[in-house]
Image (spheres, helix red, strand yellow):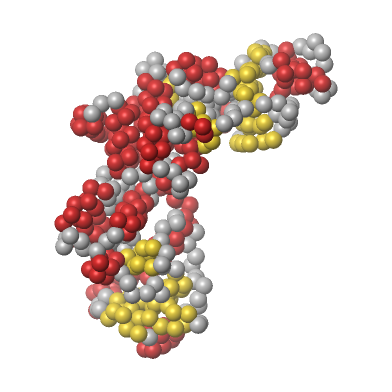
Amino acid sequence: MHTELELPTELERALEAGGQLAEGASKAERFAAVMACEGEVYRAVANRETLALPGLDLFLKRHRGSGWAEILKNALTLRRPVLGAENERAACEALPGLGIATPELAGYGRRGRHPARRESFVLTRAVTGFESLEDRIALPAQTATERHRLLAAIAQLAQRLHGAGWVHRDFYLCHLWVRSTTIAELKPELLLMDLHRARHFDRLPDRYRLRDLAALLYSTFDRTPGRFALLRFVRLYSGRPLRVELNQRGRFWRAVYRRALILQLREDRALRHTVPRVGSVALDAADCERLLASGQRLKDDPPATLVRARYQDRSVVLKRYNLLGPVHRLRQSLRAYSRVARAWRGMHRLKALGLPVAQPLGFFERRRFGLRQPQYLLQEDLGDLTLLDEFEREGLSSEREDELVRLLRRLAQHGIEHGDMKATNLMVTAAGLKLIDLDATRLVLGGSERDRRRLLRNFEADAALCARLARRLPPPL
């Protein structure tokens, strides 16, 4: 069986000292000894695992053969399968010559020619003095200067990588590491990790460049990058004036943003099945009508009635969705979900995504002769102060403005349209802004122009604030 093997001297000595390898062993025996090594497992997926070798500053990533199922799956999706450690070896050898730091290659091995059963491994030196950018950027003490320098370093690394015809194909922020001692310097030193999917082209196709950049953008969504940060990255990556780049390549950059949003929606998809069908409070029609009769009336419009009441020793808000005549009742009865069900689902989905909403407590709905009856939603009491009240009383502080912009960006990143984004549907609490009235929420890829326009209409009395928000809020695709 064909075998390629390059091992560091210290590993061979350690294997011989541990009795795992006889002195003068053949190439095949040495390969088998490395594949049988044990250590602290850092990652294990399918037929690939990464582990730290005890007593040695070495990491072993071994591939045990991809199998025909993996090859067929990649063939059906028109992708090139990763069959072994060859890609990582080639990247670790080539990228340092381009000015891109990678883990130091210490050894490599491959056994077999059959693509589905080929075994291989790569050995790299342990990386010291570096920390993950994913962890670093999450630190609250990070200054604006540090963020700008890191952004420039990331853009420069990505430009060098793609400019040389290389694509990472797993280009997330967690695979970019920064040397801790260079954070405060003008050019922080970055290191590129996890290169097992890296691939080289004589001329890099745009679709691979797009996927790398979209993965990088998606991995920053938890930090809600601002519009200006994204535009600064585009300018630094392209090396051209922003106006020129967007005029000539605007379609490409919109596609990058769209793909990043699609990656986020794929991650959020599992949350559609986590909405509980019952609340923490059991309700029936009699309970709801009793609360409506005894509570403090907050709103009594034809579409909905809202009261504040005491229930089970706490202050709650009960909302009744009214039906406006036979035609409205019939139209609502033909819909797959009632208004209260849409509100319930919306509250739980946004809550699962970490977005600020009122705590849902329970709901009640029923049909009679196939027709919907009035529906009830019980939620926590957030007080009376809305964002519109705060604006009319004292204007919006810079902190509140930043919080509002972050909230709208996060909604856009998760592809959520509120549907009725009025300042009266944003409650001001001690914990910050919280969204209410979520029965019109829906998925809208790329942000909602309707939400944006509706929100700006609330602040028309302050032209300067309106202009700032219009610049800062995420423009829809």
Q: Identify the residue at image location x=36%, y=44%.
A: 225
Left or right: 253 with respect to 103? Answer: left
47 and 75: which one is in front?
Answer: 47
- Above or below, 212 against 219 in this view is above
Give how far across and how far down residue 182 sits, in percent: 48, 31
Give how far across and how far down residue 349 sits, in percent: 43, 59
174 and 401: which one is in front?
Answer: 401
Quarter of the rendering containing residue 57: top right
- Above or below, 403 against 245 in this view is below
Give how far across and how far down residue 59 sits, in percent: 64, 27
239 and 452: which one is in front?
Answer: 239
Q: Identify the residue at image location x=67%, y=36%.
A: 41
Q: Identify the residue at image location x=41%, y=23%.
A: 161
218 and 301: which one is in front?
Answer: 218
Please give the count of numbered marks on the rendered protein.
0
Q: Dividing the image into 4 quarters, which one contains the N terminus? A: top right
Tell me if residue 196 can be seen.
yes
Q: Dividing the image into 4 quarters, which one contains the C terminus? A: top left
Left or right: 138 with respect to 35? Answer: left
Give how far across and how far down residue 368 sits, in percent: 38, 79
Q: Identify the residue at image location x=54%, y=29%.
A: 194
Quarter of the rendering containing residue 366: bottom left
Tell me if residue 207 can be seen.
no
